[in-house]
Amino acid sequence: MSINHQAWMLRYSVLWFLTVSMPLITHAVQAKGPNLEFAEVAAGVYLHLGKHEEMSVDNLGDIANIGFIIGNDSVAVIDPGGSPQLGAAMRKSIRDVTELPISHLILTHIHPDHIFGGSAFADVENIVAHRNFTRALAQRGNYYREAYSDLFANPNIPTSLQPTLEVKDELRIDLGGRRLIVTAHRTAHTDNDLSIYDHATQTLWASDLIFAQRIPSLDGSLTGWLKVMDELAARPAALVIPGHGQPGDWSTVVQPQLRYLNLLLRETREAIARSIRLSDVVDQVADGESKSWLLFTSHHRGNVTRAYTELEWE
């Protein structure tokens, strides 16, 4: 792949994500004085479900699943949400549950709905992210900030906190009688995805490596994503928490995404092998999935486009 093509692909993926593929989902923040609801989905594991909406000022970026895990000594926050206001509301909600110190803030990937609330946790010592996160933030941060500038009433609030702990392979965190394994994955949903595994409850916090109910959004590598899903399946997970949608067991939560991504892979490869142009297949590949996913018409064509531009270089 040429340098010019790589540069075009980077710009394309950023613009496509901003205009087509912002993640969407299901619960509650009020525009004034948000009051976040967190459910204890496993012992000491708290989850807030985002809304199935486009990211906006009205919902304060409350469109992704966010949460925290409590140990005997400290708390780990998993994604601070999609706006500074949401991050502040999340911190207040944590304090309603526990007074233990927050020792870790884990940023599962670069997308705005997961990181824009980071300023509320600026005092946390350990900011955990994928080894590629800092580079991705430098490349994309300004695009994201400009696209959602209305969420930042104070221009001095950073787009995201800078990592203090970069994960190359695995990072083991002890919250006091509670061990977490943070895994850095190959390029999949993005090129900077983390997953978190809680030994105590066998909970796999997959973030946007797994989508439920709403259609997955491809911003990395289709083939890589399928490989990562195979790797995640090796973990003995009693509960899987997706980045968007309801949690559940592996089969219930993950099988629909596996079906969709495999169909996208197979039919896109077949179209390329027959030398069919992207413009002629973008509405045909995996179109049988249209009734299986929320927001299909808004995001599927972007997935086909991204898959085609990846696979034509195989």
Image (cartoon, rainbow, N blue to C red):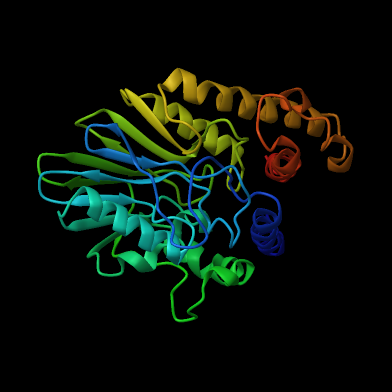
Query: Nearest the camera: 175 or 154?
Result: 154
Q: In which quarter of the image is residue 45?
A: top left
Q: Which residue is drawn at 70% across and 58% down?
A: 12
Counting from the top left corner in percent of width and height, residue 163 is at: 34, 64
Counting from the top left corner in percent of width and height, residue 49 is at: 45, 41
Residue 282 appears in the figure: yes
Q: Left or right of 278: which side holds 82? A: left
Counting from the top left corner in percent of width and height, residue 131 is at: 38, 57
Q: In this view, does 301 lie above or below 251?
A: below
Q: Left or right of 159: which side holds 273? A: right
Q: In this view, does 63 lie above or below 262?
A: below
Q: Which residue is drawn at 21% across and 50% down?
A: 75
Counting from the top left corner in percent of width and height, residue 139 is at: 55, 67
The total number of labels drawn is 0
Considering the image in quadrants, where does the C terminus appear? Answer: top right
Q: Which residue is drawn at 49% across and 63% down?
A: 32
Query: Nearest the camera: 4 or 233?
Result: 233
Q: In which quarter of the image is residue 25?
A: top right
